[in-house]
Image (cartoon, rainbow, N blue to C red):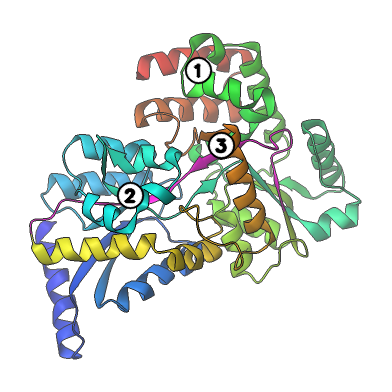
Amino acid sequence: MRGYFGRKTAIVAALLASTGIARAEDVEVLHWWTSGGEASALNVLKDDLATKQIGWIDMPVAGGGGEAAMTTLRARVTAGDAPTAVQMLGFDIQDWAAEGQLANLDAVAAEEGWDAVVPVALQAFSKYDGSWVAAPVNVHSTNWVWANKAMMDELGIAQPTNWDEFVAAMQKVKDSGKTALAHGGQPWQEATMFDGVVLSVGGVEFYRKAFIDLDPEALGSDQMVEAFNRMATLRSFVDENFSGRDWNLASAMVINGDAAFQIMGDWAKGEFLKAGKVPGTDFLCFRVPGTQGDVSFNSDQFAMFAQTDPAAQAAQGEMARAIMSPGFQSAFNVVKGSVPARTDVPNDAFDACGKQAMAELAEASANGTLVGSIAHGHANKAAVKNAIYDVVTANFNGEYDAATAAQNLVNAVEAAQ
């Protein structure tokens, strides 16, 4: 494996030399941004680095939740051939830092003043033992509903403001013979819906107690049983072909008028924008009904793996600077559907959904109602996250009822700690 990537780097270097293009260094970047909207956003970063004479060696690993990418990364590191930079989420950053694999970015962070502009909730994942080890690209939030406005107008459906209204809206779509809820049957997608459902049942206090504090009483409570009952309700509104469908294909169902709603993080907006759709005109964005004021978040970050070559280290520093520059943060997140990881970026270039997301993130951060996503590695470590995945997906697929799911959740989380 190492020989292959060594040859690949040499070939790229030779091609660059043959065209007369001078590069300070190439960065090999492992990521899972492979959908249309994600690829468009990633091109913003590639183009920005090209202006700094930094070449990009692309290593995409498809899979919306990043699990496949992390498996590939482990193989690369084990082979002694770590990429220059890796897209990473939450506790995965902390785990790699604890292994001593990540580069120290304190010098760049101090020069650029990151401490003053990155929210503390993000710094908890960007830093390890007080030192910066990753550069946050964005802040995503997961408790969103994306809706086809034309279908809602046709059926006389108003934007729902609570759970009962949401269920009634989905029932009206189903009664019309159309698919109410676009969904892809993959564990991370079910867990993403679960983020919003749990908040809709018990708010931030219950969410924290159950999934951040991992309190057994909360995990097995009547509120948790209700959360699993709500997941079963959602299951009744998906089409029969949902199993294994990628998230962006579920987004396409809403975009194309084949389904009314999708519960998905705000990366889904990138698919709508890529398709030329306009928020408020072609589609609506609103929080999972019952979670207004609450935000479950995750943040894509680029962790830099330790390098011994000074040129590679310099390239990493330039990449980190580029990622954290206000201009890039605006340009990238406008395309991606997320919001900047810096608090000082103006919202002028953002659409209506983007402005709403930025305002709600700031409000939740100020009010203490900003919580890490269960589904995306910002509430707990991978072993616990995966244990939750197993229970949520089994319940969603009808393997056991809500009461059994709650009890199994208690047992699974205890075993995973």
SS at badge 2: helix
Please name the residue that numbered disc 3 is placed on.
190
As drawn, the label of residue 409 is 1
Q: Who is closer to the viewer here, 256 or 51?
A: 51
Mark 1 Cα shell of 10 Å, populated few (<14), some (14-19), many (≥20): many
Residue 93 image offset from top left, x and y in percent: 31, 41
Percent x, y for residue 48?
37, 73
In the picture provided, is 316 more to the left or to the right than 199?
A: left
Res. 69 mark:
2
> Residue at image x 18%, y 36%?
99
Magenta extent: 285-308
Q: Amino acid at mark 1?
A: Leu
Residue, far right: 156
Instruction: Quadrant for the N terminus, please.
Output: bottom left
What residue is at 69 percent from the left and 60 percent from the top? 352
Residue sitting at 9 percent across and 63 percent down?
310
Q: Nearer the viewer, residue 46 or 231?
A: 46
Answer whether residue 346 is visible to the viewer in this image.
yes
Q: Earlier in the sequence, mark 1 or mark 2?
A: 2
Q: Is residue 368 above or below residue 246?
A: above
Q: Is 290 inside the magenta-drawn segment? A: yes
Q: Tell me the quadrant of the picture where the C terminus can be found.
A: top left
Nearest to the observer: residue 153 or residue 242? 153
